[in-house]
């Protein structure tokens, strides 16, 4: 994982992974290539450092998970109407992630930015 190009390039290293993949340690030393304007770690590098691990841990420990995404015609029309009237809308969508037994193992909220297309 430490050799994966986005991690290698930003100096992120996976230090330790438990045999059951229930814990791991990741580090990123502060270097000139992952430093922001004020001298601390760049936020994008910090997010990249933590992004995939809970997902990978759950895949290995839960087995299969699934989520169903649905939008009704009414929701789409409502967003279109709001975007026409307000120029932009920021709807929040929720989805549940279920395990093989249909039990909820995670809930995700996703905020989107929807705006009327600028034809100018």
Image (cartoon, helix red, strand yellow):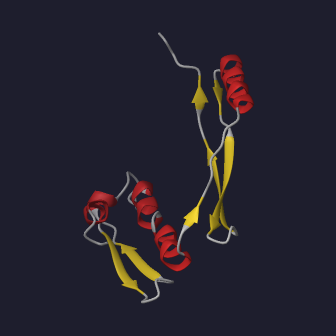
Residue under the image location 58 percent in, 20 percent down:
116
23 displayed left or right of 15: right
Q: Point out residue 78 in the picture as x, y percentages from the top left corner.
A: 73, 26
Q: Can I make out residue 49 in this image?
A: yes
91 displayed left or right of 63: right
Q: Point out residue 5 in the picture as x, y percentages from the top left corner.
A: 26, 61
The answer to which image quadrant residue 113 occupies is top right
Give the vertical position of 79 relative to 21 (above or below): above
Residue under the image location 64 percent in, 21 percent down:
87
Q: Residue furthest bottom?
A: 19
Give the vertical position of 116 relative to 52 (above or below): above
**Numbered disc total:** 0
Give the vertical position of 21 relative to 38 (above or below): below
The answer to which image quadrant residue 4 occupies is bottom left
Q: Can I make out residue 40 in this image?
A: no
Towards the viewer: 17 or 72: 72
Q: Point out residue 25 in the picture as x, y percentages from the top left corner.
A: 43, 81
64 displayed left or right of 32: right
54 displayed left or right of 78: left
Residue under the image location 71 percent in, 17 percent down:
85
């Amino acid at each position: 994982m430490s050799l994966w190009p986005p991690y290698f390039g930003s100096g992120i290293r996976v230090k330790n992974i438990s045999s059951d993949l229930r814990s791991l340690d990741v580090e990123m030393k502060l270097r000139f290539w992952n430093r922001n304007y004020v001298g601390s770690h760049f936020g994008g590098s910090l997010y990249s450092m933590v992004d995939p691990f809970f997902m990978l841990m759950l895949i290995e420990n839960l087995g299969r998970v699934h989520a169903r995404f649905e939008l009704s015609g009414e929701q789409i029309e409502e967003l279109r109407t709001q975007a026409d009237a307000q120029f932009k809308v920021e709807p929040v969508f929720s989805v549940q992630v279920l395990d093989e037994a249909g039990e909820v193992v995670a809930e995700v909220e996703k905020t989107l930015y929807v705006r009327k297309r600028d034809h100018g």
